[in-house]
Amino acid sequence: MAQLEKGERGEPGRVDTTRLQEIARAYTRSAVLFTAIDVELFTHVHQGADTEPALAAATGLSPVDIDRLVTCCLSLDLLRWAESGALRLENAPDVDRYLVKGERGYAGPWMHFTRPQVVDWFRMTELMREGEPTRLGMYEDLTPEAARKYHRATSSIGFGAARRFVRGVDLAGRRRLLDLGGGSGAYSITAVKAFEGLAATVLDLPPVVAVTQEYIALHDVVGRVDTLGADFTQGAFPACDVVVMASNLPIYDGVVIAGVAARAFRALEPGGEMHLIGEMLDDDRRGPLDAAMWGMNELICGSQGRAHTRAECAGYLAAAGFTDVEISDFIPGSLARAFGRKPA
Ligand SMILES: C[S@@+](CC[C@H](N)C(=O)[O-])C[C@H]1O[C@@H](n2cnc3c(N)ncnc32)[C@H](O)[C@@H]1O
């Protein structure tokens, strides 16, 4: 059977409007997900309200709205029919793991993280016509309260990513990790727990490190993880033998990221290593879509940031002087990791 090309749906060789219509109404999917989380639909299903009448009772919504919501969630493969039959519902595996309130993996705050920007996404044309952004990054007006809320959202996925990092990167024998834009401290906290003898410094903006200290205390690593309130776009970094910068890439343009890599290189001991983790585009910029959209998110936030390709990220490290530069998948289809070593 002939392959379908991008832009084709249905019969191979025939172009129709199906894909374009799906894109035009893609916002409806986000809205359904937000509402399902708002009314705790998946939490109720998990707790046993697994029929439509039971969901209507648990959520207080009308039977017809439950019918609509369940139908959409079934079509989005967020809900499934249980094999046991009798029109019983169950959550899809990812929904059950991450969207059940009160469970350890609950990522509801992260799913809502960009919801306040929905209106501005639909003002994209005006924003582009209004002209050049003037802010360097999206963090210029941050308050500790905003930082606390922000990191309640990011930490729900940051700690998972950090666990993946320590499973894949051997830091045995390393002594001081510098975590640039470390936020909740997810990477530092997880790394010092995984590697004996390792200490870490979370460098983040002054309003954020007050919040970082709360996570450090919560995870019982006071004394092994400390904080430095600073702006990583300027100034020298403290001495270290590992630098991690995670989930900051699209927030800044290439000049800033290259500058960070150069100053990280100077701070590292000979033989030290840097890991740049984040959304990276494939070199032909045909995806991943999520990386492209995080770049566009910077327009919405009014910053100069944009999505970077894997080759650009490798180039920032190489230009700083790093050798053995390598890019690997970190979370396939979402995040990549650029590695570089300072020559011994
Ligand atoms: C998306 S969060 C990532 C947090 C953490 N690295 C993680 O992966 O869980 C980005 C962090 O970078 C920090 N950040 C952004 N710009 C910064 C700057 N110029 N100087 C210091 N920190 C910055 C933000 O305050 C925020 O805590």
Image (cartoon, grey):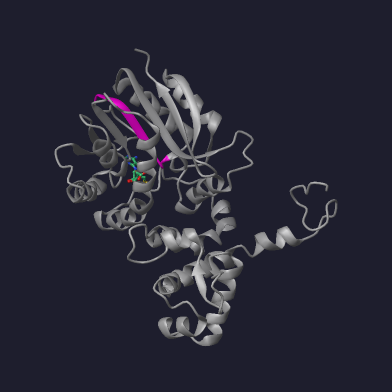
Q: Quadrant of ligand 1?
A: top left
Vertical comparison of 85 with 262: above or below: below
95 relative to 189 in the view: left or right: right
Residue 88: percent from left, percent from top: 52, 76
Secondary structure mostly seen in the magenta stretch: strand
Q: Residue at x 35, y 42 (%)?
A: 163
Vertical comparison of 272 with 179: above or below: above
Residue 241: percent from left, percent from top: 28, 24
Residue 245: percent from left, percent from top: 37, 36
| Residue found farthest to the left | 223
Q: Residue at x 26, y 23 (%)?
A: 173
127 relative to 186 in the view: left or right: right
Is residue 139 among the parts visible in the rendering?
A: no
Magenta part of the protein: which range?
239-248
Locate the C terminus and report the quarter of the image it occupies.
top left
> Which of the 4 quarters of the picture holds residue 238?
top left
Number of numbered discs: 0
Whether residue 74 is in magenta: the answer is: no
Q: Nearer the viewer, residue 180 or 137?
A: 180
Q: Residue at x 42, y 21 (%)?
A: 320
Q: Residue at x 33, y 55 (%)?
A: 150
168 relative to 308 in the view: left or right: left
